[in-house]
Amino acid sequence: MDSKKEDAASAPTSPESRRTRSNGKGKTIAEAAPPAVTVVSTKATPSPRGRWRKGAAILDFILRLGAISSAIGAAAVMGNNEQILPFFTQFFQFHVQWDDFPMFQFFVFANGAAAVFLILSLPFSIVCMVRPFVVGPRLLLVIIDIFTMALVMAAASAAAAVVYLAHNGSQDANWIAICQQYTDFCKVTSEAVVASFVAAVFLIFLIVLSSVALKRR
């Protein structure tokens, strides 16, 4: 009799017996269901405006690198430009160099200064990429770009006027076209002027991009 009780006590309880138990008065108590767990995501989703401003900051950095390359190229090409004609006389040598023209001296200085200003502005452009909604660095970039664009445009325009006279001359002023003799010098000068105008175009795009980014803040 005792062995039967021990077997009954050691027998595993069925799932149904676990689910309902008697409280001694004939009533059954249902096993409590586990509480529902709600998963809340704490990951912030970037807004479309934030993505646009970050993309604009990345494009600003790329355009800034292009303007730096163009300005440095224009200054370097013009600063190394000279030509010596293969014929000369006993008292005179046909030699032309970029620093013989004050406009070309201003051209080299202006493009070199523009490249320095643009290089110094790169950290502010990086700040705009890291913090897209910041306003102060973006406004400072607009001011720097406007000043630099005006400087580069003035230098490129002045040099372009000299190049035009060198190619075509002026009958009213009795100026001859020196590019008929100094062909290599004029070719290199034209390339430098084109590179400077390319830098000015990059700067115009930078100003427009920064202005739109400030407007949509």
Image (cartoon, rainbow, N blue to C red):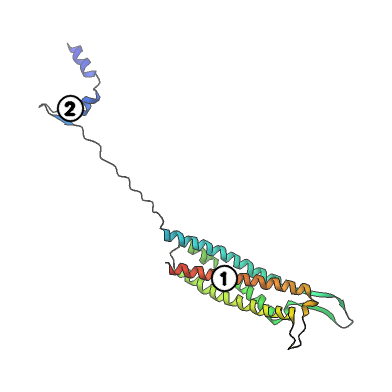
Q: Which mark is residue 203?
A: 1
Q: Visible in this render: residue 80?
A: no
What is the distance, in whole Å, between disc 1 and disc 2 at their CAs? 82 Å
Residue found at x 30% / y 44%: 38
Residue found at x 72% / y 81%: 165
Secondary structure category for the residue under label 2:
strand
Label 1 amino acid?
Leu
Determine whether, in the image, residue 66 is placed left or right of residue 175: left
Dot 1 or dot 2: first in sequence order is 2
Residue 159 quadrant:
bottom right
The x, y position of residue 141, in whole percent, is 51, 70
Residue 36 quadrant:
top left
Q: Nearer the viewer, mark 1 or mark 2?
A: 1
| Quarter that holds the C terminus | bottom left
Determine whether, in the image, residue 185 is placed left or right of residue 5: right
| Quarter that holds the N terminus | top left
Determine whether, in the image, residue 46 is placed left or right of residue 209: left
Q: Residue furthest right?
A: 90
Up/down of 57 relative to 41, above or below: below
The x, y position of residue 8, in whole percent, is 21, 17
Q: Residues within 10 Å of mark 2 (few under 14, many from 20)?
A: some
Q: 216 or 18: nearer the eye?
A: 216
Label 2 amino acid?
Arg
Determine whether, in the image, residue 35 is placed left or right of residue 198: left
Q: 177 or 56: nearer the eye?
A: 177
The x, y position of residue 184, in whole percent, is 77, 72
Q: Which mark is residue 21?
A: 2
Secondary structure category for the residue under label 1:
helix
Up/down of 164 relative to 47, above or below: below
Q: 165 or 87: nearer the eye?
A: 165
Up/down of 16 relative to 201, above or below: above
